[in-house]
Image (cartoon, rainbow, N blue to C red):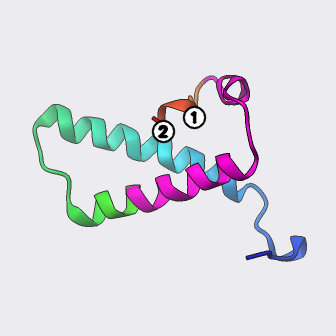
Amino acid sequence: MKTPAKFQYPGFETINWFAAKKLLKELKELNNEGKKCPPYFLQGVKALLGILKQWNTDKDVSLEWLYTRDSNLKIYTFLK
């Protein structure tokens, strides 16, 4: 789907990467507490991961770029 630039939300992709970082933290906390992940949460994480991988593939981004994009975000950890 090609959306005209005037209708695109600025920073949409970046916001999704930060959301993934937050969700990863929550998943780790659930795991550390020995709690089961709710199905809706897991479904959302899988959907987000799918689009993040697609964006990464579409841009043909090198692994070096992922390491340098934002040292706090560590994008490469989501793509394992």
Find residue 75 and name its label.
1
Disc 2, SS: loop
For the residues labelled 1 and 2, say whether their Cβ atoms are less than 8 Å apart.
Answer: yes
- Is residue 18 inside the magenta stretch? no
Residue 48 in the image: above or below residue 34: below
- Is residue 67 inside the magenta stretch? yes
Residue 51 screen position, x and y as percent: 56, 58
Residue 12 screen position, x and y as percent: 69, 59
Q: Amino acid at mark 2?
A: Phe
Residue 18 screen position, x and y as percent: 56, 45
Residue 68 screen position, x and y as percent: 71, 23
Find residue 16 and name its label.
none
The residue positioned 39% from the left and 41% from the top of the image is 24
Identify the magenta region.
Answer: 46-71
The residue positioned 57% from the left and 49% from the top of the image is 53
Residue under label 2, please give it.
78
Q: Nearer the viewer, residue 42 or 33?
A: 42
The residue positioned 76% from the left and 47% from the top of the image is 59
Within 10 angstroms of label 2, few (less than 14), some, or many (20 or more) residues? some
Disc 1, SS: helix
Residue 80 in the image: above or below residue 54: above
Q: Amino acid at mark 1?
A: Ile
